[in-house]
Amino acid sequence: GASLQSLDAVADAQRLELERQHRPDIARDLHAGLDRLVPAGWRDRRMVLITGHRRENFGDGFRNICRAIAALAERFPDVAFVYPVHLNPNVQKPVRETLSDRANIVLCPPASYPEFVWLMDRSSVILTDFLLFILAMTGAVAAAVVALDLPEVGGLSGLFAHPNVQDKLD
């Protein structure tokens, strides 16, 4: 049976999925699904997988990300850039406006978990906007720590004791 090899459940799940994909029946179904995502001839090219959908990037953030992807695609014409595009219109619009007519970029529907694991395994590079989310959350936590340390707030106990907060905790 399946066994965990690390303390990282995500890494183990991905490893188990890749092992499962070697079964002939699974591989056949997987490749049929991949046909709707990535042209068959692209599967042997060097690949960059792109994922981006964080709401923190809506608007100018996505336009800038797309311009950067377009510049990379132009600089590396032999590389296949594969972007399973999130269905949110705030993602679809800038992505399709900027990237849809590029010869080495395929914009495809969102991938299933097995398809996405296959794409990650095949990709030389994965570009994501998740790092920006981590940076934003780190900044928010740091700001909260600083705010809690202000004498006017009085730490976490002072915050919880404040009348404007206390009635929300009941």
Image: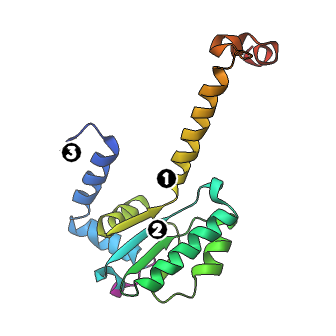
- Residue 131 circle label: 1
Q: Is residue 39 magenta?
A: yes
**Distance (Cα) linking label 3 and label 2:** 30 Å
Q: Which quadrant of the figure contains the N terminus?
A: top left
Q: Secondary structure at mark 1?
A: helix
Name the spot of residue 54 as percent of width and height, x first. Answer: 59, 55
Q: Amino acid at mark 1?
A: Leu
- Residue 2 circle label: 3
Q: Amino acid at mark 3?
A: Ala
Residue 108 appears in the figure: no
Q: Nearer the viewer, residue 43 or 147?
A: 147
Q: Nearer the viewer, mark 1 or mark 2?
A: 1
Q: Is residue 132 magenta?
A: no
Residue appearing at x 58%, y 60% in the figure: 53
Residue appearing at x 23%, y 40% in the figure: 6
Vertical relation: 115 (above or below) 154: below
Tell me the magenta residue range: 36-41
Q: Nearer the viewer, mark 3 or mark 1?
A: 1
- Residue 50 circle label: 2
Name the spot of residue 148 as percent of width and height, x first. Answer: 65, 21
Mark 3: give few (<14), some (14-19) or many (20+) Cα within 10 Å.
few
**Distance (Cα) linking label 3 and label 1:** 31 Å
* In this rendering, position of residue 39 left or right of residue 16: right
- Quarter of the image for residue 20 reads bottom left
Q: Secondary structure at mark 2?
A: strand
Q: Amino acid at mark 2?
A: Ile
